[in-house]
Image (tube, rainbow, N blue to C red):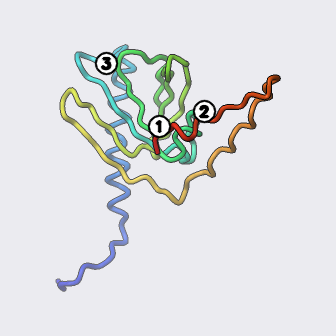
C-alpha cells in the first residue's frame, strides 16, 4: 500500500450523509406514528431555504434567504413524512405556516433533551435562485416606513 491518499471512486461521504439523514426521517416518522414527541424531546432542524424542493412562505424565504432553523416542540400540526422529506405546520409570530423541507436541504438536527446532534453538508451549488421581493403596498396616505435600518445584520 502506498503512502499517498487516493481519491475514492466510491462516494463514501455522500453515502454516510444519506444514511444520517435517514436517522432524521425515522425519528420524524416515529413521532408522527406515536402522535407527538415523548417526554422532554424537541427538535431544532436547520435547513437551506433556497435548496431544491424547499417550499416555505414567501415572507420566511425573504427573512431567511440562506438558512433557517425551525423548532418542533409543543405547537405543530399536519406532520407528514415521506422518502424525500417532510411537511409540517408551524407558527411564526402567531402566524400559521406550512413548510415542505426535503431531507437533502437539512444542515442540522438537534434534540437538546438528550444532547443529540447531527450536522450535514448541504450542496450549495444546487440552490434555487432567491425569491423576488414583494412590491411595496399602495398606501393611500403615501406613508411608507422601512424597517431595514432597525434589523440586526
Q: Earlier in the sequence, mark 1 or mark 2?
A: 2
What is the x, y in percent for residue 4?
Answer: 22, 83
Q: Along the line of sight, which residue is nearer the eye, 120 or 32?
A: 120
Query: Could you tell me which secondary element the residue under label 3 belongs to?
Result: loop
What is the distance, in whole Å, between disc 3 and disc 2 at their CAs? Answer: 28 Å
Whether residue 111 can be seen here: yes
Left or right? Give the position of 8 relative to 136. left
Q: Are marks 3 and 2 in contact (CB under 8 Å)?
A: no
For label 3, the crowd category at 10 Å Cα-Cα, with few meaning under 14, some 14 to 19 and many 20 or more, is some
Q: Which residue is mark 2?
A: 59
Residue at image location 57% in from the left, 47% down from the top: 52
Q: Earlier in the sequence, mark 1 or mark 3?
A: 3
What is the x, y in percent for residue 24?
Answer: 35, 36
Query: Could you tell me which secondary element the residue under label 1 belongs to?
Result: loop
Q: Which residue is mark 3?
A: 37
Of badges 3 and 2, nearer the viewer stands 2
Query: Could you tell me which secondary element the residue under label 2 belongs to?
Result: helix
For label 1, the crowd category at 10 Å Cα-Cα, with few meaning under 14, some 14 to 19 and many 20 or more, is few
Of badges 1 and 2, nearer the viewer stands 2
Residue 83, label in figure: 1
Q: Quadrant of the N terminus?
A: bottom left
What is the x, y in percent for residue 13?
Answer: 33, 60
Left or right? Give the position of 129 relative to 81. right
Residue at image location 33% in from the left, 76% down from the top: 7
What is the distance, in whole Å, between disc 1 and disc 3 at their CAs? Answer: 20 Å
Of badges 1 and 3, nearer the viewer stands 3
Residue at image location 34% in from the left, 32% down from the top: 44
Amino acid at each position: 500500500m502506498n503512502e499517498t491518499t487516493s481519491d475514492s471512486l466510491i462516494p463514501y461521504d455522500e453515502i454516510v450523509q444519506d444514511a444520517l439523514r435517514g436517522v432524521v426521517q425515522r425519528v420524524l416518522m416515529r413521532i408522527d406514528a406515536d402522535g407527538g414527541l415523548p417526554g422532554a424531546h424537541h427538535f431544532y432542524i436547520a435547513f437551506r431555504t433556497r435548496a431544491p424542493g424547499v417550499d416555505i412562505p414567501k415572507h420566511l424565504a425573504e427573512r431567511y434567504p440562506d438558512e433557517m432553523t425551525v423548532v418542533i416542540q409543543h405547537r405543530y400540526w399536519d406532520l407528514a413524512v415521506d422518502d424525500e422529506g417532510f411537511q409540517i405546520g408551524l407558527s411564526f409570530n402567531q402566524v400559521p405556516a406550512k413548510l415542505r423541507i426535503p431531507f437533502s436541504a437539512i444542515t442540522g438536527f438537534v434534540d437538546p433533551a438528550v444532547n443529540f446532534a447531527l450536522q450535514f453538508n448541504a450542496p450549495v451549488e444546487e440552490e434555487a435562485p432567491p425569491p423576488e421581493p414583494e412590491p411595496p403596498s399602495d398606501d393611500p396616505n403615501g406613508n411608507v416606513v422601512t424597517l431595514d435600518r432597525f434589523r440586526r445584520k
